[in-house]
Amino acid sequence: NNVLAIINLAECVTEHPVPHFIFSSSCTVYGEPDYVPVDEKHPVKSPSSPYGATKQMCEKILSDVSASSKLKVIALRYFNPAGAHPSALIGELPLNEPTNLVPVITRTAIGKIKEMIVYGNDYNTPDGSCIRDYIHVTDVAAAHVSALERLAENKSKINFEIFNLGTGRGCTVLEVVKTFEKVTGKKLNYKIGKRREGDVSAIYSDCKLANEKLNWKAERTLEEMLLS
């Protein structure tokens, strides 16, 4: 879905032509990071998952297309989007069984999942569980608007730009669980399981480039994400 869809879109935008393209990329392109926080200069390493591999391929395709045409591309590398629009008209409800932490938590809270599993408590982190950088979906949406404005105003000097989207703060899985219990007053039924293959131990963002070039900054807290 990811790779073939981007090939089809790349053919369309060069044929018609469309001048601007914003791509939803992912921090998974970094693989197991050499350092944290991760900035855009961090090497793109062998991915830890097939999903990360497809995002790497899509970035490469768009980079090549932009190098051989007038197409200007901004790739936004999301860290871990979570939460819902404040209207509650748009939420986080995956079609299939969720693998992302927050929808697993919410399904557990309402009883659709009887018991959630925290995959590993023996990582080199403060409480042994994985660290991720969670960002509110509304902040992600605002970054898209900023990216489009940058392209429309012709502020980008190169045809292919990359920006991290995160808060710059890493939270452990258990910290997210405890924060959800605190803000909602609901106790979660969970147990500690084995590590899950493909999970990196810790990754969180350096977003200074997006702060500066896009005039954007994540504003919403983990508490707001989980409460929404």
Image: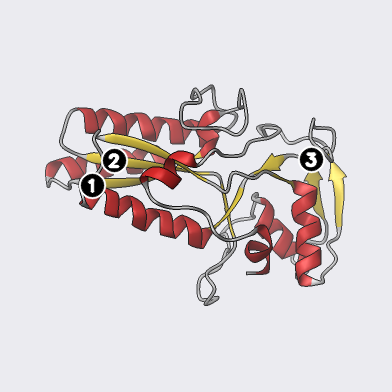
Instruction: Report how far apart the C-alphas of labels 2 and 3 lie in the structure.
Output: 36 Å
Question: What amino acid type is highlighted by mark number 1?
Answer: His
- Report whether 36 appears left or right of 155: right
Question: What amino acid type is highlighted by mark number 2?
Answer: Val
Front residue (pair 214, 86): 214
Query: Dot 3 lies on which element?
Result: loop
Which mark is on residue 129?
3
Q: Are marks 2 and 1 in contact (CB under 8 Å)?
A: yes
Front residue (pair 178, 25): 178
Which mark is on residue 81?
none
Image quadrant containing the C terminus: bottom right
Question: What amino acid type is highlighted by mark number 3?
Answer: Ser
Location of residue 227 in the rendering, given as x and y in whole percent from the top left corner: 67, 69
Q: Is residue 53 above or below residue 153?
A: above
Query: Dot 1 lies on which element?
Result: strand
Question: Could you classify mark 1 by the number of other residues whose Cα lies within 10 Å: few (under 14), some (14-19), or many (20 or more)?
Answer: some
- Report whether 151 appears left or right of 123: left
Residue carrying label 1 = 20
Give me the residue at 52% from left, 22% from top: 45
Give me the residue at 28% from left, 54% from top: 149
Which mark is on residue 73?
2
- Report whether 110 appears left or right of 81: right
Residue 109 is drawn in which quadrant?
bottom right
